[in-house]
Image: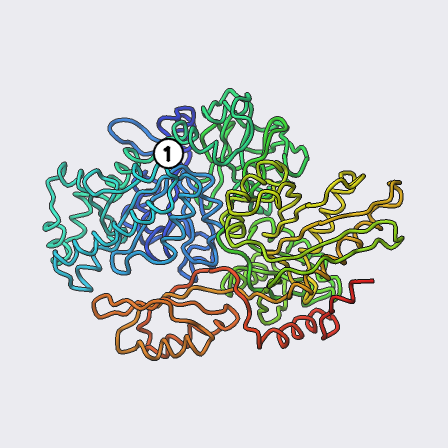
Amino acid sequence: MGRREEMVERVSALMDNKKQIRNLGVVAHIDHGKTTMTDNLIAGAGMMSEELAGKQLVMDFHEDEQQRGITINAANISIVQTYKDNDYLINIIDTPGHVDFSGDVTRAMRAVDGAIVVVCAVEGSMPQTETVLRQALKEKVRPVLFINKVDRLINELQVTPEEMQKRFVKIIAKFNDSVRKMAPKEFRSEWQVKPEDGTVTFGSAYNNWAISVPYMQKAGITFKDIYDSCKQETQKELAKQIPLHSVMLEMVFNHLPNPEDAQKYRIPTIWRGDAESEVGKAMAECDENGPLAMMVTNVSIDPHAGDVATCRLFSGKIMKGMKLQLVNAVKENTVQQVGLYMGAERINVPNVTAGNIVAVTGLRDAYAGETVASERIESFEAMKHFSEPVITKSIEAKNTSDLPKLVEVLRQVGKEDPMIRIEINEETGEHLISGMGELHLEVIEDRIRKERKLEVETSPPIIVYRETVSKESPVVEGKSPNRHNRFYIIAEPLEDEVYQAMVDGEITERDAKQSKELAKKLVELGMAKDECKKPWAVYNKNLFLDRSKGVQNLNETKDLLVQGFREAMTKGPIAQEKVTKVKIILMDAKLHEDAVHRGPSQTLPAIKRPIYAAMLLGGAMLLEPIQKVFITVPAEQMGSVTKDLQSRRGQILSMDQEEEQIVIGGKAPIAEMFGFAGDIRSATQGKALWSTEYSGYEKLPHDLQPKLTRQIRERKGLKPEPPVAKDFME
């Protein structure tokens, strides 16, 4: 029997023992050593050579990941490890660290219960470290800390033991500060990490060793021994005494929760159904004998098996041939295969039980975020992504005969990566593909060419803008084409607190279904009680309110009005970009008593046109996407860095000294950041370390508004001059 077959047998044997399962994510800033560390855990399970651990990077199995030297897709593996004479099943997800692929981290965090946050001892905590920690805590995933590359700190930076300890204290303090700010209230104290209890581990994943304070006491090794070993280049011997996988797994088994314990507090956060229902109780108890309920966290396309859905199974047991409900798609699919991930491979098993991560084929209509169950249930909460697509390219097949293939490939790409947006511009017939950044789109293009064998041509990148309003509009009357129905509309800016609650995922589109609860939330956020009694819809971070009184037949027309609101928020009046941070208020309405005279063809234009007119009278304007920029640079290079950033309409927000280095914090429009990497390297002779983080939308400077509006409209095949309110008023 081969190693993998033996591992599958051991995994299958442990699947039912919930206390001995750990669902684990490995998260970090780019290049801090996640995949290198995961190698060590895989080698410790006997699934790869210990000599190659940290060098082979088995979880980076895509060709482009190997070429670029970065993790692009979250990768899964199930392994068995022995600790204190007991076997444990660990389902690991190794996640990307580059900001463009942070959507994979969000989806992985829904599937796991615990996370190892890896921080480079040399670079320290970076912006993406805080982002991935926030993503974990938002999903009630418990984090522990691994401080990696300690050998580089000693050998390359030549720090003294005292300086090394100071760096460790600083990294731990920053980690705990983030937990204090972002963890659920009940865990802010309990999830603090401390070296003395073993929730912090130090080591070198590349050289295969690690240490924690409890392990030091057991192994009789001190920090001085480690310091001397790095100096004397005897790290191979060190790896035999304190192998990374042993030390890391002690931390995992002692401090990260099993699914049975985790689901008790995670389910009420990620599922809002009836906790006392049969399925509610089964999920909270991780009951394999209860109704089946799981969530799809990822979809990949296998050329032979079709769609492969990665799912976290919260209750029940899944096996081949089962008929399952796709709750959001309102469809039924039949399970064709059930499998476990072994890195690049997927191995079929007879069944998988609650508390595990499973690969399922046959769910052809599923997408990441879908709720799958044995019966119709309340769907899981949508996963909250912390950034959104901000760069667009048009993409065309080189050969017109490949057009049908391009349409199918783009459909598959959109299914595999929910952070990619695909749309067809009906005016121009263009296929548009939007992503998180330049690298994100570059990777997608490469994969279309190499993996899908399709020659495509793309346009230069286009920035995605948003439309909003700057002030309250007067009341605008909208009339239906037959003049029998009238709606009176106001548009005004959405309150900052309410908008932020939408950004943070505290108010979602689904909340509008519980109108009273949403109204209560809006009052708590500072809105006047009499103004928000009837919130009708939340869409694209916009709010639709009804403030009318005593209008006959309004409830019968409500769904059409909400549809019209959503359509208007999808394409704004000045440049047909999406609308955000706007409050649309229905002040009054006059409706024909006969439903025949207030159908879609009458109601939709009667609501959309006054919304557009009200927005234009409310100072409609463009918002542009902004990036935070963090640059670490030697003091003598500081001037050239700040000059470059300010030449890109950037602002310097902070400047801190860390020894001989200056850490510059700033922000700049994404539109101005093309070519920044090359320019910053040449300006600093390659001595700058830098990273970016998505920072939402801000108002485009007033003097740039007319020019940019014309450019967007011309690109979309519209008249160069934007409309005025009168164009929508009769």
Q: In the rendered image, is residue 306 in sight?
A: no
Looking at the image, which is closer to me, 377 or 5?
Answer: 377
Looking at the image, which is closer to me, 523 or 132?
Answer: 523
Q: Which quarter of the image is occupied by the C terminus?
A: bottom right
Question: What is the crowding at mark 1: few (fewer than 14 residues within 10 Å), some, or many (at least 20)?
Answer: many
Q: Amino acid at mark 1?
A: Arg
Question: Relative to residue 469, is residue 234 depicted above or below?
Answer: above
Question: As drawn, is 503 to the left or to the right of 70?
Answer: right
* Res. 446 image quadrant: bottom right
- The residue lying at 56 percent from left, 42 percent from top is 369
- The residue lying at 10 percent from left, 40 percent from top is 220
Q: In the rendered image, is residue 59 in sight?
A: yes
- The residue lying at 47 percent from left, 43 percent from top is 345
Question: In this figure, which residue is indicated by the disc labeled 1?
Answer: 22
x and y, in percent, of residue 381 in the image? 54, 39
x and y, in percent, of residue 477 in the image? 78, 56
Question: As drawn, is 129 to the left or to the right of 334?
Answer: left
- The residue lying at 64 percent from left, 55 percent from top is 409
